Image (cartoon, rainbow, N blue to C red):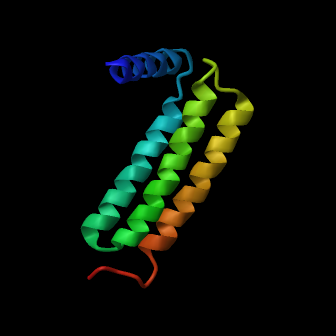
C-alpha cells in the first residue's frame, strides 16, 4: 500500500513538473529517435544487442530530462546538454543501422 502511495505521488510530481517545464522539442526528437530504432529492428538493420545499447542511451537522455525538469524549470544549459546527448545518440543510431552487423 505504501509503495502504491509513493508511486502515485511520484507520477503526480512528474506530471506537475512536466507541466511547469515543457520540453516539446526534446520530447519530439526523443520520439523520432525511438521510431528510428524501431524501424531498424523491423528492417533487420539493428541486432537485438544493438537495440539494447540504443535503448540504454535513450533511457540516459530521459533521465537527464527528468532531472532537468525536477525543479520545474529547464535551463538553457540543461537544454544544451540534453541536445548534445541527443546528437550523440542520433549518430549511434545511424552508425549501428549502417554497420555490417545485420540480422538478416
Marks counted in the figure total: 0
Which residue is most to the front? 1
Residue at 42% of width from left, 69% of height from top?
A: 50
Occupied quadrant, residue 3? top left
Q: Is residue 58 above or below residue 5?
A: below
Residue at 46% of width from left, 44% of height from top?
A: 30
97 and 18: which is toward the camera: 18
Quadrant where the image shows the N terminus: top left
Question: Does residue 64 appear to the left or right of 18 in the view shown?
Answer: right
Q: Can you give x and y, in whole percent of width and height, for residue 57 in the image? A: 52, 55
34 and 67: which is toward the camera: 67
Q: Is residue 23 above or below residue 63?
A: above
Which residue is most to the right? 77
Question: Does residue 17 appear to the left or right of 6 in the view shown?
Answer: right
Q: Can you give x and y, in whole percent of width and height, for residue 48 in the image? A: 34, 69
Quadrant where the image shows the C terminus: bottom left
Q: Is residue 13 above or below residue 93?
A: above
Q: Can you give x and y, in whole percent of width and height, for residue 16 in the image? A: 48, 14
Residue at 35% of width from left, 80% of height from top?
A: 102
Residue at 53% of width from left, 18% of height from top?
A: 17
Q: Can you give x and y, in whole percent of width and height, for residue 9 in the image? A: 42, 16
Amino acid at each position: 500500500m505504501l509503495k502504491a502511495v509513493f508511486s502515485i505521488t511520484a507520477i503526480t510530481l512528474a506530471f506537475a513538473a512536466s507541466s511547469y517545464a515543457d520540453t516539446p522539442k526534446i520530447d519530439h526528437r526523443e520520439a523520432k529517435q525511438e521510431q528510428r530504432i524501431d524501424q531498424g529492428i523491423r528492417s533487420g538493420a539493428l541486432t537485438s544487442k544493438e537495440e539494447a545499447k540504443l535503448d540504454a542511451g535513450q533511457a540516459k537522455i530521459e533521465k537527464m530530462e527528468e532531472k532537468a525538469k525536477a525543479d520545474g524549470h529547464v535551463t538553457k544549459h540543461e537544454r544544451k546538454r540534453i541536445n548534445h546527448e541527443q546528437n550523440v545518440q542520433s549518430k549511434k543510431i545511424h552508425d549501428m543501422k549502417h554497420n555490417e552487423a545485420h540480422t538478416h
